[in-house]
Amino acid sequence: MRELGDIILSARDVSKVVDGPDGSLQILDRVDVSVRRGESLAIVGASGSGKTTLLGLLAGLDLPTRGEIHLAGQHLGGLDEEGRASLRRRQVGFVFQSFHLLPALSAEENVMLPLELDGVADARSQALRALEAVGLAQRTHHFPHQLSGGEQQRVAIARAFVHGPSLLFADEPTGNLDQRTGQAVSDLLFELNAAKATTLVLVTHDLVLAERCGTVLRLAGGRRVDAA
């Protein structure tokens, strides 16, 4: 049985309803999930099943219509938008399918950015260490357009891990990569997950990648239908 103190992320009875042109649309319906520190969770399901919506709710990017979500001991519904943003800056890293690097900044500068926003004094040295950890020590001054897709995703991973987050949320992290590069990127995610004891929560269509996670949460029509 799990000890409450071990749980870093939990959702209870979470639903999400949005207004559409044809009336209300139920995107998520009473989803429960809990994740312990250092665990890995994959969220899978067909397109439109609610995967990305659930990820956004778990990360506090949006609030559920009903239900409760706790992240790193904080009830997200009890925080305003500024409070949730502050919690994310301290506790959360993000990796997206489309990288989201700033094109006018070098790899080093992209990784430094979240540290500089938090006023970290040694942002440059921390960024260089993070880039070295993802195998890009020789590419620090390259701009995104000078990097391959796999290299850009490695920069994004370095940026996500540079401030030592408790949780990493990844939305289709290998979706824009070929199979070989995607394998290398997923290997890196799990290596850092193990080395840093960072909880990993990812959305993916790749069932091979999902099965590498400790828990697989399957959604269909906004409902949790299975877990392994």
Image (cartoon, rainbow, N blue to C red):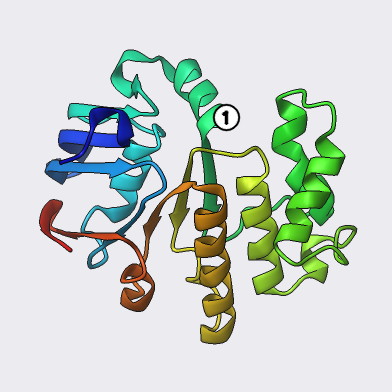
Residue 51's spot in the image, x, y percent? 28, 54
Residue 13 image-quadrant placement: top left
Q: Nearer the viewer, residue 227 or 45?
A: 227
Q: Is residue 152 visible?
A: yes
Residue 185 image-quadrant placement: bottom right
Q: Residue at x 32, y 37 (%)?
A: 57
Q: Residue at x 67, y 53 (%)?
A: 158
Residue 46 image-quadrant placement: bottom left
Report the side of 68 relative to 155 (left or right): left
As displayed, is residue 212 above or below residue 115?
below
Q: Is residue 25 visible?
A: no
Count numbered badges in the picture. Answer: 1
Say what secondary structure mark 1 lies in. helix
Q: Residue at x 84, y 26 (%)?
A: 121
Residue 146's spot in the image, x, y percent? 83, 70
Residue 87's spot in the image, x, y percent? 49, 24
Crowding around mark 1 (Cα neighbors within 10 Å: few <14, some 14 to 19, many 20+) is some
Viewport quadrant of the N terminus: top left
As displayed, is residue 111 above or below residue 90?
below
According to the image, label 1 marks what residue?
89
Viewport quadrant of the C terminus: bottom left
Q: Residue at x 53, y 71 (%)?
A: 187
Amino acid of disc 1: Arg
